[in-house]
Image: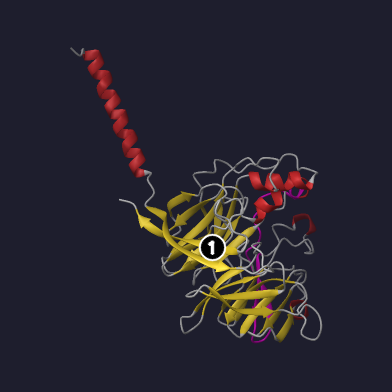
Amino acid sequence: MITNKYLFLFIVFLLISSCNQKDQTTNKDKIDLVETSDEMSFALDSNTTLLIKALFLHTENDGSEYLTFQNDKEPEILFYDIKTQSLVKKILLDTEGDNGVGKTLGYYIKNINEIYLTSLYFPYIIKINYDGEIIKKIDLKKFTNLPLTEFQSMSFCYRPLFFIDNNLYIPQFINKGIKEKNNFIENSPLCIVLDTTNMHIQQSDFKFPPLLSIKEYFTQALGVEYNYSRCFDGKRIIYSFGYDENIYITSIENKLISTKPIKSKYIKKLSSIKNRPENIQDGIKKMNEIPLYGNLIYDKYQNVYYRICYPETEIDKKENMADIWQFGRKLFSIVILDKDLNIIGEKLFPEYTYISTLMFIRKDGLYICNSHYKNPNFKEDNLSFKKFILHKND
């Protein structure tokens, strides 16, 4: 027979269990990213590597789709037809001579005959056509007295160039050349805007947030804390920084509208480096291990946003730290945000399987590269992507 004492304890246990179950249901993700059986595979020749820094899906006005990316080994941009997954074009870039573009990293395709290259070392843009012929060189320093930094239109850190009407939005980095020497971080603009009709340049009101002090920046920073990603959703420009759980929503006039915390459930706390390693390899190891936030990408078809998150992890000293960094670290998750930038889900991906910096969006889903060099199915001459779709949880 159950005594009153045990009956009371049993009822309490049921109540606690019921509350726990309710909490779990309440906290359950509304949306999940589900892997499908669909896969795309693009054959690479021996002169093309998987160390890709700039990869973009381009859609022409007639609906033709091309996966494009810049070869890390040769000065060229490759075009693959999405339907056939076959190479249809290599834009060969001369680095020297009358048609020389110098050393470039990153690009933006406005249309098939209007492609903008970004320089690796200097603040200038080169407009070329589909045959790689230079249409125009734009040295931005000729059009402003503002101190400028070099910039790259990349996907590795997702911050491509983009147009709004005739205005070209160009990313900037922390600028030590500005007048406010004692506070150069918080006075460095995130963006400059080039009016391509009159070549007028205006810098953004929005500046780098104070994530680190000047002292910490010079003595403790690994160089990834101020890495940032930005995306344009047609109305707003949104920024995500490596060492900040917040995202920053700005207007097309580059004015801050609001700040919103978007915290990964896999990152307890962003922990700073007390003692920066003197050895380069140890520094890259730390870059691969500390918790960070990564790219922010807008899906215009589903009207959602994807924020890449890197939980804290440990890497075996025997591993090639540079390769792990190049292939998007060991472990990552994707936070899913709705149109109002509310968290509706988060998916954690298996270790050493997908490349967090190589993905593209189509109408039918999110394609994430699974050509990680530590993936058991890795093939050096193959760039492959698995399709993921949003699934509403019951």
Name the secondary structure under disc 1. Answer: strand
User: Badge 1: how crowded within 10 Å, few (<14), some, or many (20+)?
Assistant: some
Going by the image, does 343 lie left or right of 383?
left
Seen in the picture, residue 132 relative to 304 is either above or below; the reply is: below
Q: Amino acid at mark 1?
A: Ser
One can see residue 25 in this view: yes
Of the 4 image quadrants, the one containing the N terminus is top left
Please state which of residues 195 and 158 is positioned toward the viewer in this rendering.
Answer: 158
Residue furthest toward the left? 1
Seen in the picture, residue 215 relative to 115 is either above or below; the reply is: above
Seen in the picture, residue 85 relative to 349 is either above or below; the reply is: below
x 70%, y 48%: residue:
320
Residue 207, magenta (yes or no): yes
- Image position, residue 46 (x, y; %): 67, 67
Please state which of residues 94 and 29 is positioned toward the viewer in this rendering.
Answer: 94
Residue 244, magenta (yes or no): no
- Image position, residue 355 (x, y; %): 57, 56
Q: How has the structure been colored for display?
A: secondary structure
One can see residue 216 in this view: no
- Image position, residue 39 (x, y; %): 47, 63
Please state which of residues 342 and 54 is positioned toward the viewer in this rendering.
Answer: 54
Give the quarter of the image for residue 33: bottom left
Give the quarter of the image for residue 279: top right
Seen in the picture, residue 256 relative to 319 is either above or below; the reply is: below
x 70%, y 63%: residue:
173
Give the quarter of the image for residue 238: bottom right
Give the residues drawn in magenta, as a range. 190-217
Please state which of residues 57 and 37 is positioned toward the viewer in this rendering.
Answer: 37
- Image position, residue 380 (x, y; %): 62, 60
| Residue under pointer 1 | 384
